[in-house]
Amino acid sequence: MPDGMQVDYNGLIPNNVGLNDDARVRKALETWHPGYIDWWKDMGPEGFQESLVYLRTAIGVDPKGWAKFDYVRMPEYKWGVLLAPAVEGRTIPFGAHKGEPAWQEVPGEYRAMLRRLIVIQGDTEPASVEQQRHLGATAPSLYDMRNLFQVNVEEGRHLWAMVYLLQKYFGKDGREEAEELLRRRSGNEDSPRMLGAFNEATPDWLSFFMFTYFTDRDGKMQLEALAQSGFDPLSRTCRFMLTEEAHHMFVGETGVARVLERTCAAMKEAGIADPNDIEAVRALGVIDLPTIQKKANLHFSLTLDLFGNEISTNAANAFNAGLKGRYREDKLTDDHQLTSDTYPVLRPRDGAIVEEQVPALSALNMRLRDDYVADAQAGVGRWNKVFEKAGINFRLTLPHVAFNRRIGEFSAIPADAQGRVLDAAGWEAVRDTLLPTEDDNHFVVSLMQPEHRAGRYASWIAAPKVGIDNKTGEFEYVKIHE
Amino acid sequence: MDHPPPRGPARIDFQTDPSRYRHWKLSIDGAVATLAMDVDPAGGLFDGYELKLNSYDLGVDIELADAIQRLRFEHPEVRAVVLRSAKEGVFCAGANIRMLGRATHAHKVNFCKFTNETRLGIEDSSENSRQFYLAAVSGTAAGGGYELAVTAEHIMLIDDRRSGVSLPETPLLAVLPGTGGLTRLTDKRRVRRDRADVFCSTEEGVRGRRAVEWRVVDEVVPPSAWEATVRQRALEWAAKSDRPADAKGVALTPLDRTFTDDGVRYSLVRVEIDRAARRADITLRGPDAPPPADVAGIAAEGAQFWPLRLGRELDDALLHLRANEAEIGLLVFRTEGDPAAVLAYDALLERAAGDWLVREVRHYLKRVFKRVDMTSRSLIALIEPGSCFAGTLAEIAFAADRSVIFAGVRAGDNKPPATITLSPLNFGAYPMGNGLTRLQTRFLGEPQTLAAAQATAGTALDADAADAAGLVTFAYDETDWDDEVRIMLEERASFSPDALTGMEANLRFAGPETMETRIFGRLTAWQNWIFQRPNAVGDEGALKRYGSGIKPAYNPQRV
């Protein structure tokens, strides 16, 4: 039953794409499956593979009732292929083919471009699992451990989603790319993941929360843009992935907020009013606020690099071809072709940062990044409510987009968090006030002591207000079996 | 919509030196030199484009050509040269597309021709100077970037699962790899033609094991072993070289030249332009003094050594005329001096052929004469009283489309009568792109004439003898000379410049095809045709639309 709302769990691979009737793709996926399981065991969460984790599993694609919660051993998780329901009569929403029926098969002329988009997206999914694989050992609570593993298994499922597209629509090349997705390794010198931020270590839980807040939000923006695709299977896949991705950002946003709450509470208990009295705050066993700001600076700037060059031919081509749209393309009211529009782009010019109007098609990466910054800003505002409520005089801010960049217009110039262009000496002078130092990281790591007792939370993080699946914070989210 | 012609320098200058490089970093460590591409995006020769991702324009290539030349002359100790990128993630993205999209057709053709000559120069370094080039490709080598890599004797590709090599011109730009990419795939790398077809129509190209299997690279190396392996391979190639370890290089000092409105004056070369006649008179001066006695004397003279100085000046003059004087369609060559003095230099060049520096000078003159062959202007040699078309300089007459010799002397003129004298250097030192000498090419159908000419080596042939030997087109005496020459030049100037370019290129390169003639021939026939077609350069064509995101619209008709 293709395009169904219910997931078929009868075969090896749960799906709602009629895999039973598609022997070729089923065989390809079944051939790929053992390699995936090997990858999961090698590169997935370290330890805890035998533990029972209270995970949600998709049982349908109806937004109202798609998930059920139960204890699962992670290697037995029902990874599968799930597409959002087909929209009857859907047309290509943008670009040169706007208004034509959405493609159900890959158009030959765009095959390479489409494959590249899918491979790059696909590569990020296992990458983050690899980056986070050591974190289980230092989980500050069973609740957080469960959230980590939920994020991990869903990133694994997102890999499945991309691999399905590769194997169904891209023939031999697609199968080879699917294999390659299992061979690259985050941070491996000889075989790194494709994008820089996905080769950075996630050494501690604050990094994990920042990553899920900032970097998974890039994933959300990319998925939103691909969900608009004129290639209908990609659109449907991404639409369903977005429902899962929302949880990852929830983990990030609430994770950071709980760290802030705990620090504020500890400061108040100890009567410390000055957030910059770092030694005193750290002595309380919580993370000082300036260090949290530095971590945010790091993850925000690394994530901006994922949007690529501000002015990009590839992005222009993908839009014009109808393959990758803008954030919420369907809510925008222009002509959706952009052939005569312009868009403002920030560029360094003679030591200053200026705004230039460039053809809108060329500036799509910039536009998506702008949408991202606005989206990320909203959560930062909610974090700052924590300080207001606690009466602590501190605000977290996002650094300027020119800060600490390695890709794009600003990669050539050092700039501070306010976007002031610096010389090399000026940058050296401020670097340690803006990015985590070795000392900062060392301190954060020193706090990462596991808390495996149900209902207990590590010293540096507050308990959640509510648990998962309407359970309380005391619920035993992971039954640890070492 | 027609773009205004891009603004650029008033005169494109082909002279530079490492202290002025904006795009390359040359470093030398013992026998191994590294030539690292680090293109300054803001350093384009013209307005209106940025040289992103190590993409290049003519200015970048002028520096490359300079570096290659200096490595040969100034660094006898360098036995291996590693071409690599100083930028992360990209080796070289090829010729800058926006530059190509905006450039005039003539500029594109000149640019491609010069880059081709430079690429062939790299191969000439490996083959004849025993200064071996290796390409260490980390990041993407696309289009002209791969064409640069493929000039090397050994191509290494980092196997980081991202870096790859490609010739994406057809799918991406609706043009061809214009710098010998297609020809080197099949002729040099011997890539199977169906694989080459797949390679050239796949935008992202190939990487990793497949790149080796298809022979588009020689080896792939994991990142952890990359630097050590690059070093190791360079040393292995260096060990095969016969270049001297203890010789002193010759500094290529700045040329002695003065530009005027109507020409250029060098120490040995004079270019005088008659704009109304669309003609440049190029006069080469023979040596004023006998050659040094031995190779030590040559080294002491350095860049002032007559053949080297003459070669550099003629080379620069040709490049200047090509790039900056598009309407000057007729180049008239003359020489001045004592033929015996030229022959004395030839004798030294022949006697000391085993010396590294003499080898460099001979191969450089060979390349300059090839540059003459490749110059798409009508070439006329006027062999007049007082001239010295002997040995090496006689090659100019054989490179010309026509040569005319003055029979006898002018009344009241005390200059000695015009002669042609052949030397051993006319019989092998300066092969053309087709692998034959100019005389072999000239006498393809007359081996007996070639043998007879060879028998005259060392003997000055007067007009009648030169005519009888088939070494000149016409011989005129004083009665006819002025009128015949004037009419010939005026007639030439009246023909279609396009037809002349095509006709001359067809007639100049008789005989066998080589990779080199195929590269230039294919460029001329196909690329220059495609560069004119709306599918590439029309307002809806691929070059114009590149980067806009808007798909080019092609005329489906096959021609």
Image (spheres, grey):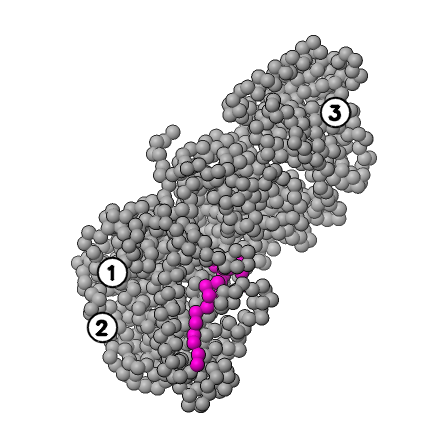
Q: Position of residue B209 (x, y in %)?
A: 46, 52
Task: Write the residue at 43% across / 40% down.
Answer: B543
Reading the image, the residue beneath label 3 is B336
Q: Amino acid at mark 2?
A: Lys
The crowding category of the residue bearing disc 2, from other C-alpha atoms within 10 Å (few below 14, some 14 to 19, many at least 20), is few
Q: Earlier in the sequence, mark 2 or mark 1?
A: 2
Q: Is residue B44 above or below residue A284?
A: above
The crowding category of the residue bearing disc 1, from other C-alpha atoms within 10 Å (few below 14, some 14 to 19, many at least 20), is many
Reading the image, the residue beneath label 1 is A83
Reading the image, the residue beneath label 2 is A68
Q: Chain of mark 2?
A: A
> Could you say which is closer to the camera, residue B202 or residue A326?
A326
> Could you say which is closer to the camera, residue A234 or residue A304?
A304
Task: Write the residue at 36% across / 62% down.
Answer: A371
Magenta stretch: dominant secondary structure = loop
Q: Chain of mark 1?
A: A
Q: Secondary structure at mark 3?
A: strand
User: Can marks 2 and 1 be said to lie on one chain?
Assistant: yes
User: Can marks 1 and 3 be said to lie on one chain?
Assistant: no
Q: CA distance from mark 2 to mark 1?
A: 17 Å
Q: Position of residue B434 (x, y in %)?
A: 57, 29
Q: Is residue B399 visible?
A: no
Q: CA distance from mark 3 to mark 2?
A: 96 Å
Looking at the image, residue B178 sits to the left or right of residue B456; the answer is left
Q: Position of residue B92 (x, y in %)?
A: 52, 49
